[in-house]
Amino acid sequence: MNPRRTRCAAALGTLLASVALGSFAAPSAASQPRELVVPSAAYPTVQSAVDAAHPGDRIAVRPGVYREQVVIRKDLTLTGAGAGKTTILAPEQLVTGSDGLNSIVSLDNAAKVKISRLAVSGPGSGTCDAGALGAGIRILGGAHLDLSHAAVSHIKDTPMAPCFRSANSILIGDFPTGAGSATIRDSRITDYQGSGIVVLNADSQATLLRNVVTGQKSISTDGIEFVEATGRAERNTVSDNACREPDPGCGPDFFTEFQHAGILANTGVTVTRNRLTGNQLGIYGFGTMETSHNTLINNEYFGMALQDGTFTAVKDTIRGGGGGVAVIASAVDTSAWLKQVRITNVSGEWIQKFECCGFTAKVTTQH
C-alpha cells in the first residue's frame, strides 16, 4: 500500500466528514428563537421582554391588563391569550414618539413584527395641548406589522380631544416622509375618535382582510383610509362612519364641504367583497381604481362616490340610503364604468354626476 496515498485518503475523509457535519449539524441553542413569558420574574412587563429579546424571539403574554406603552424596533412575535384576555392599556401619562404622537404600541426601525390574540386599548387622558392619544398602533420607519385575531379599541381621549392627526386606531406611514406596511386580518377595530385604519404615503402599503371596523355615533369618523398609499381591502365589515354634530365643515356638497366614508381609497388600491353599512359614503374613491362585489347598505349620501379619475365598478350592490353612485369631476375629466352594479331602494338618484370648473363626468353602465 502506498502510505502517501493512504494519508491523502484519510485527510480527504476527515475533510468530507467535517463538511458534512457542518452542513447537517443541528443549530446551536443560541441561534434558536427563544420564548419569553410575560409576566414572569425576569419580564414583569411587555416592554421588559421586548428589550431583552433577540431578533426573531417570541414573547408569550399571559392573560391580564398591561398598563404601558410598548416600543418595538426589532423582529419579534407577540402572542396573547386572546383579544378578550390580554390587553395592553394606555398608561395615564403617555410618552411622545419620534413622530410627535403619543401611541400605545409603536413599531420602527424596519422591524418585522407579528402580533396576535391580544387587545390594544385606550382611552387616553390628555388634551390637544398636552398628551392627547395619537394612535393605538403606530407603524413607521419601514416597519411591517402582521396583526391577526386582535382588537384595537377606545382610541380616544377622556374627555374627547378632537386633535389634528389624532386618535387613529392603526396609523401606517406619514407625510411628507415616512413609510410602513401591514397585513391586518380577522381583527376588530372599534370606538376610535379619528379613523380606524389609516395608510399614508406612496411608499406605504397595507392588506386588510376580514376585519370589523366600527366608528362612533357621537363624533365624525372615517373607517379605512388609503392616502397616496397602495394595498387591498377585502371582506371587511365597516360601519357607522359619518359627519356628526358639531362639525360645520361637513355636508353633501363635494366641492365645498367634507364627507366621511367607510373606505376611502385611491390609485393602486383594490376594494372588493366588503360590507359597508350606515356610513355617510360607503366607498369614496379617487384616481384610477376598481371596486368589485362590495355590498353597500343604508349609507347616508351615496353608496359610492368616485372623484377625479377613471373607475371600474363590477357587481357591487347598493341597497338603501340616500343615493347610488356619485361621479364627481372637480380637477380632471372623470369616467366611471359600472358593470352589473345593482342599485335598489335608495331615496335619491341611482346615478348622479357632479361637474365643476370645466371638467366633465361620464358614466357608462353595463347590465
Image (spheres, rainbow, N blue to C red):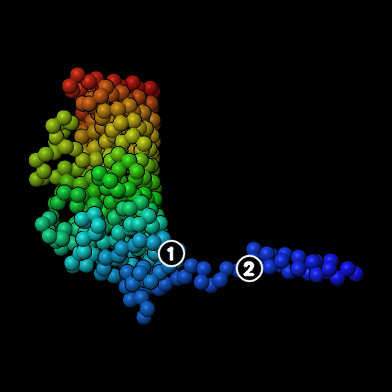
Residue 203 in which image quadrant: top left
Note whether residue 99 is visible: yes
Query: Residue at (39%, 31%) from the top-left corner?
Result: 315
Residue type for callout 2: Ala
Query: Residue at (38%, 34%) from the top-left corner?
Result: 292
Residue 90 in which image quadrant: bottom left
Residue 259 in which image quadrant: top left
Mark with earlier residue (2, 1)? 2
User: Pointer 2 and pointer 1: residues touching (CB < 8 Å)?
Assistant: no
Q: Quadrant of the N terminus?
A: bottom right
Category of crowding for the residue at label 2, using alpha-carbon neighbours closer than 10 angstroms: few (below 14), some (14–19), many (at least 20): few
How far apart are labels 2 and 1 at the CA level? 22 Å
Give the side of residue 118 with respect to residue 329, left or right.
right
Q: Which residue is mark 1?
A: 55
Look at the numbered disc 1 and give the secondary structure of its residue.
loop
Kindly give the residue lying farthest to the bottom in the view shown: 41
Q: Which residue is mark 2?
A: 25
Q: Quadrant of the C terminus?
A: top left
Question: Picture coordinates of residue 56 (x, y %)?
Answer: 45, 63
Question: Picture coordinates of residue 49 (x, y %)?
Answer: 36, 71
Query: Residue at (24%, 54%) from the top-left corner?
Result: 99
The correct choice, above or below, for 82 with respect to 39 in the image is: above
Kindly give the residue lying farthest to the right in the view shown: 1
Query: Residue at (27%, 36%) from the top-left corner?
Result: 284
Question: Picture coordinates of residue 171 (x, y %)?
Answer: 28, 51
Question: Picture coordinates of residue 321 (x, y %)?
Answer: 23, 35
